Image (cartoon, rainbow, N blue to C red):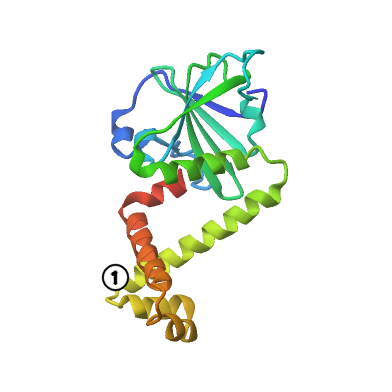
Amino acid sequence: MKDGTRLLRLRQRFPRAEKWGLFAFADPRRCALDATVVWHAKALKRVVRLSARMPNEDSSTMTRALADFNGERLAVIDTEGVQHVSIKNLGVRVNVEIKGLSVLTAPFAAIFELHDLDDLSGQAEVLKRLHRFTDTDVTTLQRSTLSGDERLRQALIALDGSLNGKTYRQIAITLFGDKKVAEEWLGPSQFLKDRTRRLVAKGTELMKGGYRDLLS
């Protein structure tokens, strides 16, 4: 499209691809690094869902357009006319489901939807990531990416340790070193123990399908 967004309009559904969590299979003639992989919204753990409204001069709601979100944008319009937009920049990706927007390049006022009270913090974090795409200061996104990448690295190390039968303490030593564990493991604070447990849980979540949020 004229704003740089790539567009894929689906004329039909592809049930076999949907079984694999995809809207459609990638072109097998393309190199794996160049092929376009479009994950189905139902296969993703978190998706930003919004209803687009026509801009109203009397409203205090900020007007946005897809071009305001810095990064690679891929839009898929499914057979029901729902628009699914994937935005990626510096290794961070956010998937957005848009309803009510007749022209993808048109400005709109966004009404965001929140689902499941038990996951409000997770949904809020995804909204923060989306908002960072509107920041012209790329270092803001870089800082977020670096911290996220480090946590993923630690989660995978923790998962390897857990699968190899290591205790939480042994995993913590691998991650944080003997000195830190010796000083804090038996202390009054449970922070290091809780952090190690969370990293093992995160690694297990990735192993059981959460990795698709990273590949999408």
Up/down of 133 relative to 145, above or below: above
What amino acid type is highlighted by mark number 1?
A: Leu
Percent across and percent down for residue 66 are 61, 28
Percent across and percent down for residue 40 are 38, 34
Q: Is residue 24 visible?
A: no
Up/down of 79 relative to 198, above or below: above
Q: Nearer the viewer, residue 85 or 123?
A: 123
Up/down of 188 relative to 115, above or below: below
Q: Residues within 10 Å of mark 1 (few under 14, many from 20)?
A: few
Q: What secondary structure is found at the residue carrying circle 1?
A: helix
Q: Nearer the viewer, residue 16 or 175?
A: 175
The quarter of the picture where the C terminus appears is top left
Q: Residue at x 57, y 15 (%)?
A: 103
The quarter of the picture where residue 78 lies is top left
The quarter of the picture where residue 146 lies is bottom right
Percent across and percent down for residue 13 are 34, 23
The quarter of the picture where the N terminus appears is top right
Q: Is residue 124 visible?
A: yes
